[in-house]
Image (spheres, rainbow, N blue to C red):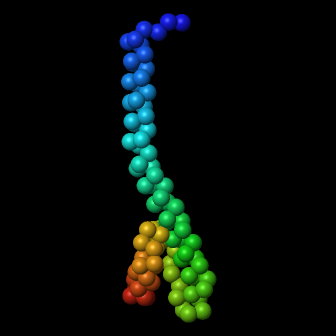
């Protein structure tokens, strides 16, 4: 099987284009995956606060927005959710 130079250059160009497209689409997917993981972790933190916070009278509603705020912003996000919960009720 004999390949000419033109065919080899086309295959190399297609390979480079494919690698470029894979790296181009991986960044948004990594960001989305990180957001999902942080939201799940934020939900777990809210569940833990609800299990311990019942003693102190702090109960937070578990929904995707409060879980995302807690997961993405961390401790300041948790404080913001608690303050918002106190103002609402």
Does residue 29 appear left or right of residue 48 in this picture?
left
User: Looking at the image, can residue 65 be seen?
Assistant: no
Give the quarter of the image for residue 7: top left
Residue shown at the point (52%, 88%) measured from the top left: 58
In the rendered view, tell whether residue 53 sits above or below residue 2.
Answer: below
In the rendered view of the protein, which quadrant contains the C terminus? bottom left
In the rendered view of the protein, which quadrant contains the N terminus? top right
Give the quarter of the image for residue 50: bottom right
Residue shown at the point (39%, 36%) measured from the top left: 20
Residue shown at the point (42%, 72%) measured from the top left: 73
Residue found at the far top of this picture: 2
In the rendered view, tell whether residue 52 sits above or below residue 26.
Answer: below
- Image spot of residue 82 (x, y percent): 45, 84
Residue found at the far front of this picture: 5
User: Looking at the image, can residue 50 be seen?
Assistant: yes
Give the quarter of the image for residue 54: bottom right
Residue shown at the point (43%, 88%) measured from the top left: 86
In the rendered view, tell whether residue 20 sits above or below residue 88.
Answer: above
Q: How many marks?
A: 0
- Image spot of residue 48 (x, y percent): 59, 79
- Image spot of residue 70 (x, y percent): 46, 73
């Amino acid at each position: 099987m004999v390949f000419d130079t033109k065919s080899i250059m086309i295959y190399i160009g297609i390979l480079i284009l494919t690698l470029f497209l894979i790296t181009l689409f991986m960044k948004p997917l990594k960001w989305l995956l990180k957001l999902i993981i942080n939201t799940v972790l934020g939900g777990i933190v809210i569940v833990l606060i609800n299990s311990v916070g019942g003693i102190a009278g702090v109960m937070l509603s578990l929904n995707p927005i409060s879980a995302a705020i807690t997961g993405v912003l961390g401790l300041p996000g948790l404080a913001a959710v608690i303050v918002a919960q106190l103002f609402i009720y």
